[in-house]
Amino acid sequence: MADEEKEVTDELEVLQEEQEGLKQEKETLNRELEAREATIGELKEALTARDTEIDGLKQTVAEFESKLAQINELLSQAVASYRELVATAHPEIPPELIAGDSVAAVDESLRSAEALVDKVKRGIEAETAKTRVPAGAPQRAPLDLSVLSPREKIEYAIGGSSSRK
């Protein structure tokens, strides 16, 4: 029995050492768990702060989008007014030729329209110059004597009738 008692005692000591090791491991794991729970708590707080910040930024973006829409509407109205003003200032240019959604585009279309109107005016003036008829009767031109025969020239000089008048 002494051997059995020694074995049991040895086993008991081994089990107590294992139990002591397990207790230490448990304490270590509990400390790690507490540290991780603290980290998780900090991360949750940071996440909540970020969510709040994101909500604030989303609201700011929505406000800026609203303001941008208002500004774009005002810009559109200003460009339309400018286009009407340009059309009024240039009555020789058809208003349909003046277009654009910005001041620069309206100015560019005005330059193009002016060039077109000038080209059409020059074409009309050139056509008019080609078909211009002088006012009144045509000027009298002297008779071309170079085509007359000597006999006809003599008759013309003495005032006689000629067959080729």
Image (cartoon, rainbow, N blue to C red):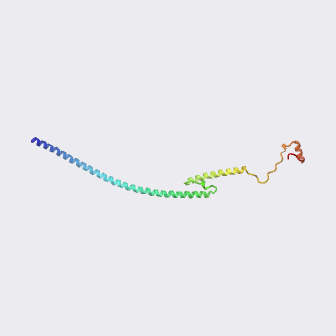
Residue 51 to residue 162: above or below: below
At a point 69% along the width and 51% down the height, the residue shown is 125
The quarter of the image holding the N terminus is top left
At a point 13% along the width and 43% down the height, the residue shown is 8
How far across and down, in percent of the image, does residue 144 sit? Answer: 83, 45
Residue 149 to residue 31: above or below: above
At a point 68% along the width and 51% down the height, the residue shown is 124
Residue extending furthest toward the top = 3
Pick the front one: 40 or 7: 7
Pick the front one: 43 or 138: 138
Asked whether, in this view, residue 26 is left or right of residue 116, the answer is left
How far across and down, in percent of the image, does residue 77 sit? Answer: 54, 58
How far across and down, in percent of the image, does residue 158 sit? Answer: 90, 47
Residue extending furthest toward the front = 163
How far across and down, in percent of the image, does residue 121 sit? Answer: 67, 52
Asked whether, in this view, residue 153 is left or right of residue 71, the answer is right
At a point 32% along the width and 53% down the height, the residue shown is 42
Q: How many marks?
A: 0
